[in-house]
Amino acid sequence: MNPQTVGDLGPALEALYRILNQFAHLPAATFEAGKIVLRSGVAPGVSITLHHSYAAFEAWREALDIDPATVDRWESSHDSHDAYAVLEGETAFAGVPVRLRGFTSPVRVPAAPDTVAA
């Protein structure tokens, strides 16, 4: 469905209202009800975006019951000083698609030390 009117967004707005009430204790986020991009295409739904930390993303992921194995993760940067990790998962809440996205500092894995042959 491609929403044409505000009325078409009714289910997404209702789901967002329920999310805000049920999860009022979770970290603040940016919320959007409207057309969202999902793996399967574009659909009316709710987008929740976090710019805090991995812990904030995890709190929302657990609350929305998103399987951690289905969360996509990649690193991005504008330059070497502006690197960040992007985490993204999808679910449905109150019958409406929900996309959860988090931007966090990337977790760096230290390089293995060089070995010297004896």
Image (cartoon, rainbow, N blue to C red):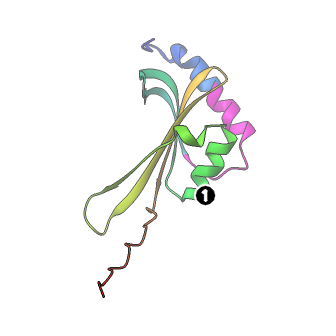
Report whether residue 111 is seen: yes
Which residue is labeled 1 in the image?
55
Task: Quadrant for the N terminus, please.
Answer: top left
Q: Nearer the viewer, residue 71 or 100?
A: 71
Up/down of 108 relative to 117, above or below = above
User: In the image, residue 30 lies at what x, y percent?
Assistant: 52, 45
Q: Report the label total.
A: 1
In percent of the image, x 58 and y 18: which residue is there? 10
Question: Magenta region: which residues?
Answer: 15-29
Farthest bottom residue?
Answer: 118
In percent of the image, x 32 and y 64: which residue is there? 82
- Is 92 placed left or right of 74 in the picture? right
User: In the image, residue 14 lies at what x, y percent?
Assistant: 65, 24
94 drawn magenta: no
User: In the image, residue 108 lies at what x, y percent?
Assistant: 42, 67
Up/down of 34 relative to 58, above or below = above
Picture quadrant of residue 111: bottom left
20 drawn magenta: yes
Q: Is mark 1 on a helix, strand or loop?
A: helix
Report whether residue 28 is seen: no
Q: Tag 1: residue type?
A: Ala
- Is 108 placed left or right of 95 in the picture? left
Farthest left residue?
Answer: 79
Q: Residues within 10 Å of mark 1 (few under 14, many from 20)?
A: few
Task: Quadrant for the C terminus, please.
Answer: bottom left
In percent of the image, x 54 and y 14: which residue is there? 7
User: In the image, residue 22 lies at what x, y percent?
Assistant: 74, 38
In percent of the image, x 42 and y 28: which residue is there? 39
